[in-house]
Image (tube, rainbow, N blue to C red):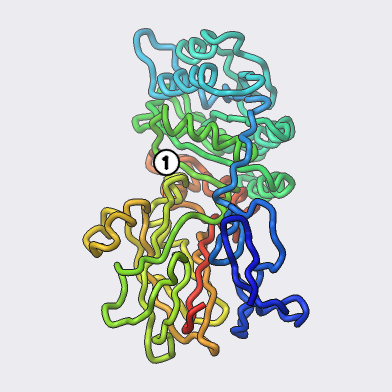
Amino acid sequence: MSKVSFGKWVIVLSLFLSSCGSSDVDYDNVNDVIDNCISSEPVENADLIDPCTGCNRDTLRNTPSKKIDNLNVYLEISGSMKGYMPKQTGRSTGFQKQMASLFSWFVTSTEAKGKKFYGIKDDQTTLEFESKDDVASKISRAEFEFGKTTTLPDLVEKIIRKNGQEDVSVIVSDFLYSPPNVLNLEGTLNVRLREMFLKRPEMALSVYAFKSDYSGKFYTVTNKVINNCCNDKRPYYVWVLGKQPLVSKIDKLIAEKMTFEEELHIGKKYGNIKGEILAHSGRDEFSTWQRKSDCPNIITEAKNISKEEKLIYTISLDLSKLPKQHQNLEYLKSNLRVSSSNSKSNITNIYTYKDFESKLTKEDVVLAKKYTHFVEIETSSVDVPNKTTLNLELQNSLPIWVENWNTESDETDAERNGKTVLLKRVISGIQEAHENETLFSYPYIITASAL
């Protein structure tokens, strides 16, 4: 055997790896993560190589943070938006308070080469804001000439077309769909939105849902006018569009400065996230497996992984940098999967740190504080030669609040009470452009012999 130095890491390899023509580097008859990544040649940036798998540690790479070229903020000022901004002396709606504040934060706290604020109505965009004071005051005093209507798909498409590669666009709207042809309520709404985002696969979307008191005329999906609406608080939304790293800058601002009801993120990926198999906590007390020394993602000498016995273990994950939508326990229970080509594995439970704390052994107390979530897994029926490579993967799906805020008709008080007509069709069309995407993965290995 010879040793090849990868910076501070040393990986032991056989001298004749390249000559034998085999891709099974560790000679266990299974092609896996280790086989795919370990090389007998020195590599650049060796400090970014995982010594356990030989793979790049993507989460450790520091890429320069780009500045937003242009922040373009669009406020819809069609007729349906007037109820959020009624001209009443001495009283402001929740919308006026929240959005006047948000627009001011955009001016003072967002790093961008250029910032422009627009009003959009009747499918036309007009520059409405001229100064820092103008941004907040026009919303607070509702100093707009409100239009009649804005066609939802056209509004989104025009803004996407204008969005440059390093730009971020923000849309503030109730996102009500009022097609000119009342016989075509659904039409190709979700199809059009899906196609828009398929053409821009690099574009991420964050949606923040708010509710506000509303006073005035309300326009239903069939363009019926409801006077003196509404007794309930009406939903409205802030959409943030652009490349993921740039959108994340606006996400951070909104998360820190604003109080919103719900959030949604589409087209975002988080790569490999930090985690490790707990050596002591959350395991079957009768099992004899060991975690490989200095390799927190490898279980070695796992003798009990036959059809008759189950290997029970817990993986800790740090999801603190993900949006709250993807940290939500119910979301994780519905969308986190464990996959393997040659074993049967299933997730039996997922815990937050608070829920898992009582299960911690004294050996893991300090270590566990680095992590936010704990995933309990059972593995059995591993094919010969008793080794398997697995992946914990989080799939993208719509959160349950989209269904709860959706209504298929808003003609009656009961139907429109706190809901947005056809909201699910709007969002699901965009979601379909990112169908079956994996948001993050955590690879790990179980083997019946020491690696």
Q: Amino acid at mark 1?
A: Glu
Q: Residue 274: where, in percent of width, then height?
A: 47, 55
Q: Residue at x 63, y 29 (%)?
A: 67
Residue 231 is drawn in which quadrant?
Answer: top left
Residue 271 is drawn in which quadrant?
Answer: bottom right
Q: Residue at x 44, y 48 (%)?
A: 325
Please give left or right for residue 264 compared with residue 123 in the image.
left
Report the front residue among 253 and 398.
253
CA neighbours of label 1 inside 10 A, class few (<14), some (14 to 19), many (20+): some
Q: Residue 61: where, in percent of width, then height?
A: 59, 47
Q: Residue 238: where, in percent of width, then height?
A: 52, 32
Q: Could one spot residue 228 in this view of the protein?
A: no
Q: Could one spot residue 124 in this view of the protein?
A: yes
Q: Secondary structure at mark 1?
A: strand
Report the front residue among 447 and 7.
7
Q: Residue at x 60, y 64 (%)?
A: 54
For the N terminus, give its image quadrant. bottom right
Residue 414 is drawn in which quadrant?
Answer: top left
Q: Is residue 48 above or below residue 102?
A: below
Report the front residue among 149 and 171.
171
Q: Residue 429: where, in percent of width, then height?
A: 61, 50
Q: Is residue 414 above or below residue 135?
A: below
Report the front residue among 364 and 432.
364
Please give left or right for residue 159 compared with residue 397 in the image.
right
The residue carrying mark 1 is 262
Q: Residue at x 31, y 69 (%)?
A: 280
Please give left or right for residue 81 compared with residue 215 in the image.
right
